[in-house]
Amino acid sequence: MIQLTTNRRLRYPDFMSTAAPPQPVVLRLAIVARPGQRQALLDFLREAAPYYEAPGGIRMRLLQDANHPDKFIEEFEYATSEAFQADNLRVETDPVMKSYLDRWRALLLDKAEVTVFHDVTSQIR
């Protein structure tokens, strides 16, 4: 008697998957540069941005208020909630990140206003 065995797993096309698609997360930091520190803030962010994005799955943007040149939104788009959670851990534990954040805070007039959004665009398309 011949016995057929296989170690292969059956693979179904992606459209048959029941797993939810990754849900991007957007973190927005509303900030105001200290008087006379606008350029220093821009220089700092130019230096820090590659480190902020280094783990991958993170994209940073900087938006300037059209009516107030010292007012900005720093926007971080995380590809997945896991990337967002990993970056939160990095903020809490990484000494290099803590140093960057200390330098950043010194350039701000007040504390940043933090807002976290979940991208639910996939629910309407």
Image (cartoon, rainbow, N blue to C red):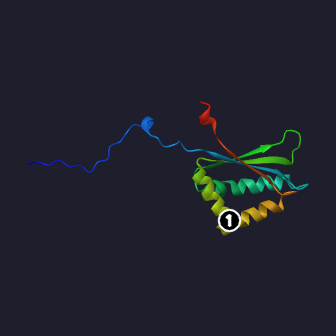
What residue is disc 1 on? 92
Residue at position x 77%, y 65% in the image: 102
Dividing the picture into quadrants, the one containing residue 109 is bottom right
Label 1 crowd (10 A; few <14 / some 14-19 / many >=20): few
In the orientation shown, which residue stands out farthest toward the left? Answer: 1
In the orientation shown, which residue stands out farthest toward the top? Answer: 125
* Label 1 secondary element: helix
Residue at position x 59%, y 44% in the image: 23
In the orientation shown, which residue stands out farthest toward the right? Answer: 35
Q: How many marks?
A: 1
Question: Residue 4 location, x and y as percent?
Answer: 17, 47
Q: Nearer the viewer, residue 97 or 23?
A: 23
Q: 94 above or below 20?
A: below
Quarter of the image where the C terminus is located: top right
Question: Residue 15 location, x and y as percent?
Answer: 44, 35
Answer with left or right where residue 47 lies relative to residue 82: right
Q: 105 above or below 4?
A: below
Question: Residue 63 location, x and y as percent?
Answer: 77, 43
Q: Nearer the viewer, residue 76 or 88?
A: 88
Residue at position x 90%, y 55% in the image: 36
Answer with left or right where residue 98 lies relative to residue 22: right
Question: Residue 90 location, x and y as percent?
Answer: 64, 62
Q: For the residue marked with disc 1, what is the amino acid? A: Glu
